[in-house]
Amino acid sequence: MQTCKECGQQKPENEVQLGICDTCFNYGAPSDGSQRWSPGGSSRGQTQNSNVILTTSIDVPNRQVDRVISIIASEAALGMNIFRDIANNFRDLVGGRSESSQKALKEARLACLEGLRREAAALGADAVIAVDLDYNQLSTSGSGGGILFVAASGTAVKLAPL
């Protein structure tokens, strides 16, 4: 079991990524400090972050870009622990998919996208267009292991009213 940094609840490991549970990641932690979530509540994530549209295209369908606010970026670096390194070396030898690496990449990608939403919301943007994700691995001491690095960037824009 892991503790969510946002709501403080104990959750199973598969429901906590980068210290934030799935519920808080998707809907934000309760704004009143309580350790419960309600879909109609005024949580931080629901009012600000989840309304920000992310898209890899250069526009938002059926919406006009009113103005460009800024280029924004978000990064996530996850250390690959020794056990993941051993499992990956074994996968290199016998072939197949590495579940631990896939999970780490997903965690980093979701963290980057949430970082873009937060930064865009802080700037007053309605959307982030032309989102680009870049993946890399930084090796440490030539061991083949190291740090998974994911960077997301895009253009924060204000959309014209409907």
Image (tube, rainbow, N blue to C red):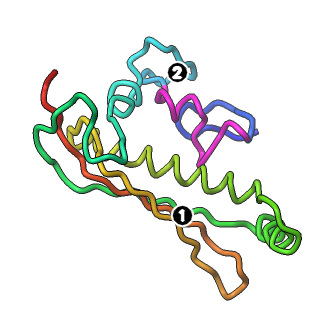
Residue that badge 1 annotates: 77
Q: Quadrant of the C terminus?
A: top left
Query: Of 39 and 105, which appears nearest the observer?
Result: 105
Could you tell me residue 81's position as x and y percent?
73, 66
Could you tell me residue 94's position as x and y percent?
88, 70
Residue 113 in the magenta stretch? The answer is: no
Q: Residues within 10 Å of mark 2 (few under 14, many from 20)?
A: few
Q: Quadrant of residue 136?
A: bottom right
Q: Magenta region: which residues? A: 14-29
Amino acid at dot 1: Ala
Amino acid at dot 2: Ser
Contact, mark 2 vs mark 1 (Cβ under 8 Å):
no
Could you tell me residue 140's position as x and y percent?
64, 82
Q: Secondary structure at mark 2?
A: loop
Q: Decide: is 69 above or below 158.
A: below
Instruction: Mark 2 or mark 1: name the one nearer the start of the chain.
Output: 2
Residue drawn at (69%, 66%), measured in percent from left and top?
Answer: 80
Q: Is residue 144 left or right of residue 20?
A: right
Q: Is residue 85 left or right of residue 147?
A: right
Could you tell me residue 93's position as x and y percent?
86, 74
Residue drawn at (24%, 56%), measured in percent from left and top?
Answer: 71
Q: Is residue 36 left or right of residue 151?
A: right
Q: Secondary structure at mark 1?
A: strand
Residue that badge 2 annotates: 34
Q: Quadrant of the N terminus?
A: top right
Q: Decide: is 143 above or below 81.
A: below
Query: Of 139 and 3, which appears nearest the observer?
Result: 139
Query: Of 101 and 94, which appears nearest the observer?
Result: 94
